Image (cartoon, helix red, strand yellow):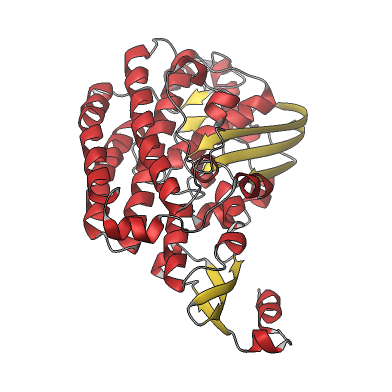
Amino acid sequence: MSTRVDIVLDRPDEQASEHQVLNMGPQHPSTHGVLRLVLELDGEIVVKCTPVVGYLHRGMEKLAESMTFHMFCPYTDRLDYLAPLANNVALSTAQEHLIGIEIPPRAQAIRVMCTEMSRISAHLLGLGAFAMDLGAMTVFLWCFREREKIYDLIEHLSGARFTTSFTRVGGVANDIPDGFLSELKAFIDQFPEQVASFEKMLSRNRIWVDRTKDIAVITREDAMSYALSGPNLRATGIEWDLRVNRPYLGYENYDFDIPVGTVGDCYDRYLCRIEELKESTKILQQVIQKMPAGPVNALDSKISLPEKSSVLKGMDELIHQFILVTEGQDAPVGESYFAAENPKGELGFYFRSRGGGYPDRMFIRAPSFVNLQILEKIAPGNYISDVVAILGSIDFVMGECDR
């Protein structure tokens, strides 16, 4: 880290020597985590912006090599910790892609439900924090009120509010509790009215528009060059969403639109997330209507844990449980990559297997890490105060970035 900062400071030319170097972060409320920005300033204008990451690095990809596929699930809760259920779903679907199994329709529908609940929760916090950074405290409180309702639903479903660890290779940890779908329906019935109140508060607010309109425009070419994904990519006008372009978990059976922008500025990124709140609500309504019956785990004793009552009575079931817990699911030799459309963008898992229940190598394509690269391109030319708006519009999580 020190080497990178020395490079920034070591500017021998006379013009650069007149610039001021300012550290924004790693402890700064507007950096939304331990992100450090080394800003080179000409007065109040940013001349150069160098992101410095790694303060939250925990070596997750290396840790995965010594864990069975099932054992790594709790670690994904600590990636984008605003959407742990979506991380769980992406990991388990990637593992199943490697092993070569397909989960039952009911398990697929439950996973879609988990992902869209997570998208709403993550966008609510992103929008609320973005608004608070620019002075709209009321929107922050409104967003957290709705997010608390989502957390109550998540707690009812998984037993935890924050670190859910809900999915399993071959399905999910447990079926939907009694009364859960009616509770979810009650939430989504009232949610569109709340989203409308966010729009009334911000979309035509003179201060909000002035702070976000035409600020940090990302062109379509730059978005593709920097491999952006999620709302940051779609705000530039590129209609790319893995749920539609590379469907998984039966997303092709749901009717929803992909919101896209026209300019690619901070305002468009805000609008895309607002529209995604509405689209996720539509998907959840369809999940409730179409929820199929049947098992929630693959009916294969070498993939899913047997029923506890059977383990206590049968020797075969006891042996299968012992092998699955200690050795994991047996994956074939080979490589596999799967990516899911998470709230922040494309969350991908690459696995290399030499056989057995442990991955030989795992790599995480973290959307927050990739999206942050664009800062060095779009921050220069803006005021210091605009950097706060830019960070809020990118909507990243450092747990996912540093891994």
Residue toward you, 26 or 356: 26
Image x and y of residue 106, in percent: 44, 16
Image x and y of residue 50, in percent: 61, 69
Residue toward you, 26 or 135: 135
Image x and y of residue 401, in percent: 57, 55
| Residue 257 location, quadrant | top left
Q: Answer left or right for 247 relative to 309.
A: right
Q: Answer left or right for 184 relative to 22.
A: left
Residue toward you, 284 or 127: 127
Q: Answer left or right for 344 relative to 355.
A: left
Q: Is residue 127 above or below residue 5?
A: above
Residue 178 visible? The answer is: no
Image x and y of residue 86, in percent: 47, 37
Quadrant showing the C terminus: bottom right
Q: Answer left or right for 134 relative to 387.
A: left
- Residue at 69% from the left image edge and 89% from the top image edge: 14
Q: In this view, does 21 lie above or below 262?
A: below
Residue toward you, 305 or 298: 298
Quadrant showing the N terminus: bottom right
